[in-house]
Amino acid sequence: MPKKTNTKINGSNYFRVTATIGKNANGSPMRKQFYGSSKKEAEAKRDEYMLSINKGLSPNFDKALFKYVFKAWFDNVLTPSISLSSRNRYEMDYRLRIKDCLLSEMKLVDIKSIHMQAYYNDLLKAYTVNTVRLTHKLLRSFFIYCIKTDLIIKSPMIAVELPKDKPVSDTNKPISDDDIKRLLHAANENIENFIFVFAIFSGLRLGEILSLTHGDLDFVNNTIHVNKSVKYLNVDGKWQAVLSHTKTLSSIREVPILNAIQRLLQAHIKHEKEKHLKLGVPFTSESILFSSYSGTYREASNVRKMLIRLCDRVGIERTTFHSLRHTFCTILAKQDVPLKTASVLMGHGDIGITAKIYTHVDSYELKRGIEKLSVYFE
């Protein structure tokens, strides 16, 4: 017996049922039609839809495609609430790993944990574990938004197994006292190398150092005023230096200038004044403390490369710029500077970060103490 139908679309027969799904802004009833190959199938679709509506989902939840909702969220919700540097990072994440991914053409309500797992597994073929985790962080925020706006009931992230991080060696370990002396010697021979000595004995982040102006140095109180950071970013298609606030509110701080580096600091300032004179650029309190050859902000990547070349030249193990900041904190720990004081000088928002470095130093001292017992075997 043929199935009973009541409508024809493009030459095919269907059964259509209609349901009132709510009211619009004018108070008029909103109706939605459901189609099936039989009355039973059409009613089943209606009942499933109404069940979702009764659970609080938006009336148009079944039409929301991932690619459209994500782009709207990214442009109108996420982007206005984050810094320019974060925006650049997330835009790259979106363009390379999300825009045309396998989720793109799917309806939000159809995306399940199995789809997310397949997506992450596919990403791992081309990207590192850390990159996949950063993408996950972005998508997790998006699906939380979808729940809040009644587009889905629960996040498809719930049953996803993220890839495990592979153990890596600590690349930010402090440099030795001998290596510090070699960098000091290098700065005495060529004042261009002073930036690395400045980092070791101030503890500032690279972005903080590169954003400093001569006006940030207070020689009356002998302090450095840290209140900003700089980073080169792509802004409207142009690569340029962008000043921003410090990493956290705790990062705004006054760091005393070590008296022992005053001579080198003054030699560096003299060098900067001579550079400005050659460039024909006025030297003011707004002039950049560690400027490029053209008197502009230096790019962090160039400074890092310069450090690697210097390490090779003076015969010390290659290190990172952040290791110089780590070295500063380690020196404070070895000199019994209180943890709270060190945390303030470092500009850490969480004292626990400073404590980890202090604990590492304590562990080193304990081992050194135990080794003293070896005299009984001599």
Image (cartoon, rainbow, N blue to C red):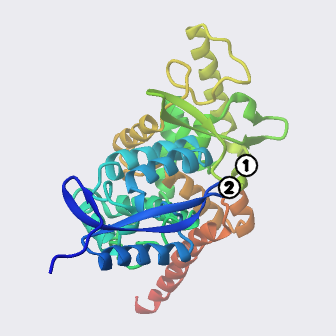
User: Is 59 in front, or is 284?
Assistant: 59
Position of residue 168 measured from the top left corner of the image (x, y, whole percent)? 35, 67
Which quadrant would residue 230 be assigned to in this image? top right
Position of residue 294 measured from the top left corner of the image (x, y, whole percent)? 51, 18
Position of residue 201 measured from the top left corner of the image (x, y, whole percent)? 62, 49
Count of marks, rendered view: 2
Q: Residue at x 72, y 56 (%)?
A: 250
Crowdedness near tag 2: few (<14), some (14–19) or many (≥20) residues, C-alpha within 10 Å: many
Which residue does the numbered mark 2 point to in the structure image?
347
Left or right of residue 255, residue 128 in this image: left
Q: Quadrant of the C terminus?
A: bottom left
Q: Compared with residue 27, is residue 276 higher up or lower down, i.e. above or below?
A: above
Crowdedness near tag 1: few (<14), some (14–19) or many (≥20) residues, C-alpha within 10 Å: many
**Labels 2 and 1 touching (C-beta < 8 A):** yes
Which residue does the numbered mark 1 point to in the structure image?
252
Which quadrant would residue 342 be assigned to in this image? bottom right
Residue farthest toward the right in the current orientation of the protein = 220
Residue farthest toward the top in the current orientation of the protein = 280
Q: Residue at x 30, y 60 (%)?
A: 128
